[in-house]
Image: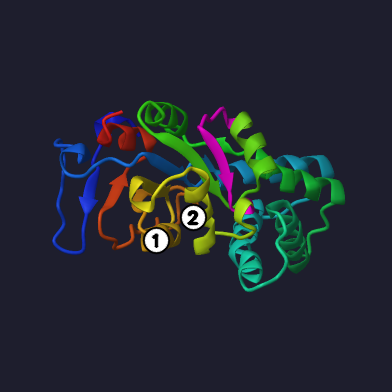
């Protein structure tokens, strides 16, 4: 995903305006702050966790469809967070992941040891970055304040960013709002902590629900295409129909579009 594949454009509710080689800076004022989703946008959670699970299985001698286990585990992610959004006491992502993993393993009849289960949970701190993430973030930091805005808690994100060698200016988390995205209070807390008005910020994510929630508060939505997030056989997410949407094929593409 290099600059040669740059196809960034602004999308408005019809008609669509393509910027091509003109660049976004010729049309709109660039945001001061870029907030980044992490899981799926900056890092490849699926293949990373499958590798962690397969390594644990080799040690324990277990056989299973670990790709399916990881997919089921990820699908249990949002329902677990929904309980928090609906009023349950806030718990960090490690706690939710332990519970959901236990449920997935029980339904599939997989007797993974407590130690190996904990290895899988800690695997969320050792996710590989997408090939464009490191260079793209470094370039974007030249002209913008960059920060994570993830459902991962701060301790998890600190470990993950160090493992993946990804650099941002601030590590922000839904934890700081005692909530989970796409709850509005998560985005509002991030803006408050960065002393930033919504119109001076953009939310960068590969997930339409994240962008819809941010755009509803006045942040500029930036959709990053990650067609392999759910593996080569899965249908990629479609960009949401949002005014002012910027689409990019990775962070290097986004950096080029923003003149970084």
Percent coordinates x, y for residue 238 in the rendering: 35, 59
Percent coordinates x, y for residue 172 in the rendering: 56, 44
Kindly identify the residue that appears in the image at 47 percent across and 29 percent down. Answer: 134
How packed is label 2: few (under 14 Cα within 10 Å), some, or many (20 or more)? Answer: many
Disc 1 element: loop
Towards the viewer: 198 or 11 = 198
Identify the image quadrant of residue 251: top left
What's the magenta region? Answer: 164-175
Identify the image quadrant of residue 51: top right
Kindly identify the residue that appears in the image at 41 percent across and 29 percent down. Answer: 141
Towards the viewer: 169 or 129 = 169
Vertical arrangement, residue 167 with respect to residue 221, above or below:
above
Kindly identify the residue that appears in the image at 57 percent across and 48 percent down. Answer: 46
**Cα–Cα gap, marks 2 and 1:** 8 Å
Identify the image quadrant of residue 213: bottom left
Give the residue number, with chain letter if any, for mark 1: 217
Give the residue number, with chain letter if any, for mark 2: 187
């Amino acid at each position: 995903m290099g600059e040669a594949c740059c196809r960034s454009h602004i999308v408005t509710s019809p008609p669509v305006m393509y910027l091509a080689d003109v660049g976004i800076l010729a049309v709109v004022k660039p945001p001061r702050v870029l907030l980044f989703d992490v899981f799926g946008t900056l890092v490849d959670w699926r293949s990373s966790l499958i590798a962690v699970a397969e390594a644990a299985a080799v040690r324990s001698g277990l056989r299973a469809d670990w790709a399916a286990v990881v997919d089921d585990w990820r699908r249990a992610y949002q329902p677990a967070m929904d309980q928090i959004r609906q009023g349950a006491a806030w718990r960090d992502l490690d706690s939710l992941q332990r519970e959901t993993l236990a449920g997935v393993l029980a339904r599939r009849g997989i007797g993974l040891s407590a130690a190996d289960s904990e290895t899988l949970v800690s695997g969320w701190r050792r996710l590989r970055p997408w090939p464009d993430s490191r260079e793209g973030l470094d370039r974007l930091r030249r002209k913008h304040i960059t920060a994570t805005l993830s459902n991962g808690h701060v301790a998890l994100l600190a470990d993950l960013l160090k493992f993946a060698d990804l650099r941002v200016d601030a590590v922000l988390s839904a934890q700081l709002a005692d909530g989970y995205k796409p709850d509005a209070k998560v985005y509002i807390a991030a803006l408050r902590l960065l002393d930033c008005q919504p119109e001076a910020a953009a939310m960068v994510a590969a997930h339409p629900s994240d962008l819809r929630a941010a755009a509803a508060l006045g942040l500029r939505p930036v959709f990053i295409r990650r067609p392999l997030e759910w593996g080569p056989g899965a249908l990629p997410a479609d960009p949401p129909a949002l005014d002012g949407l910027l689409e990019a094929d990775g962070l290097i593409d986004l950096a080029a579009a923003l003149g970084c």
